[in-house]
Image (cartoon, grey):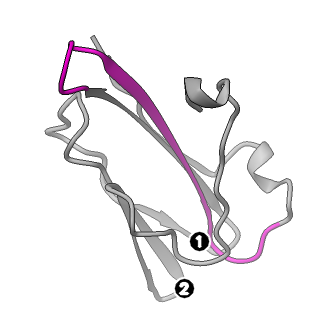
Amino acid sequence: MNEAEDFQPRSVTHDSIPDSSTDAGVLLREIDGVLRVQLVATPFGMPRRWRRPPAVRLARGEWLRWQINYRFTGSSGGEWTYRLDTLNIVHGPAQPDLFLGTPARHVNELGSLR
């Protein structure tokens, strides 16, 4: 959401591997029927994350919610913007309302943005 759009929520759904054209990404690897998921945080946001959670492994039918937030400082005036990324990934087919429920795995990387 951003102020220019009256804080209307925005989401993107991919029926495949997530888009890697952004400054953050997702590493996915399937081994022996288990999906390994690792979020790659953007190097441009604060706070710096020196220690990151390990990759999450999902069995078929399980899903993951990974949340991370950032503060970005502008180049003039010290103004800053906030960004919250919520990644929902399911291993295998899913019902349309799946992500409205409770995930099998949840990674919370929400940091203090002083």
Pick the front one: 81 or 75: 75
**The quarter of the displayed image where residue 82 is located:** top left
Q: Is residue 39 visible?
A: no
Which residue lies most toward the left here?
50
Question: Eyeballing the image, is 67 above or below 77?
Answer: below
Pick the front one: 19 or 91: 19
Q: Does residue 67 appear to the left or right of 61 in the view shown?
A: left
Q: Does residue 21 appear to the left or right of 49 in the view shown?
A: right
Q: Which residues are magenta?
A: 74-94
- Return the x and y of residue 11 as percentages of the image width and height: 66, 49
Question: Eyeballing the image, is 2 above or below 78?
Answer: below
Q: Is residue 60 visible?
A: yes
- Return the x and y of residue 60 as percentages of the image width and height: 65, 75
Dot 2 crowding, Cα within 10 Å, few <14, some 14–19, many 20+: few
Residue type at tag 2: Gly
Residue picked out by circle 1? 59
| Alpha carbons under labels 1 and 2: distance apart | 7 Å
Question: Eyeballing the image, is 24 above or below 1?
Answer: below
Identify the secondary structure beneath mark 2: loop
Identify the secondary structure beneath mark 1: loop
Tag 1–tag 2 contact (CB < 8 Å): yes
Let me know if residue 37 is in the magenta part: no
Residue type at tag 1: Ala
Dot 1 crowding, Cα within 10 Å, few <14, some 14–19, many 20+: some
**The quarter of the displayed image where residue 13 is located:** bottom right
**The quarter of the displayed image where residue 96 is located:** bottom right
Residue picked out by circle 2? 33
- Residue at image x 39%, y 67%? 21
Q: Does residue 53 appear to the left or right of 10 in the view shown?
A: left
Q: Which mark is residue 40?
A: none
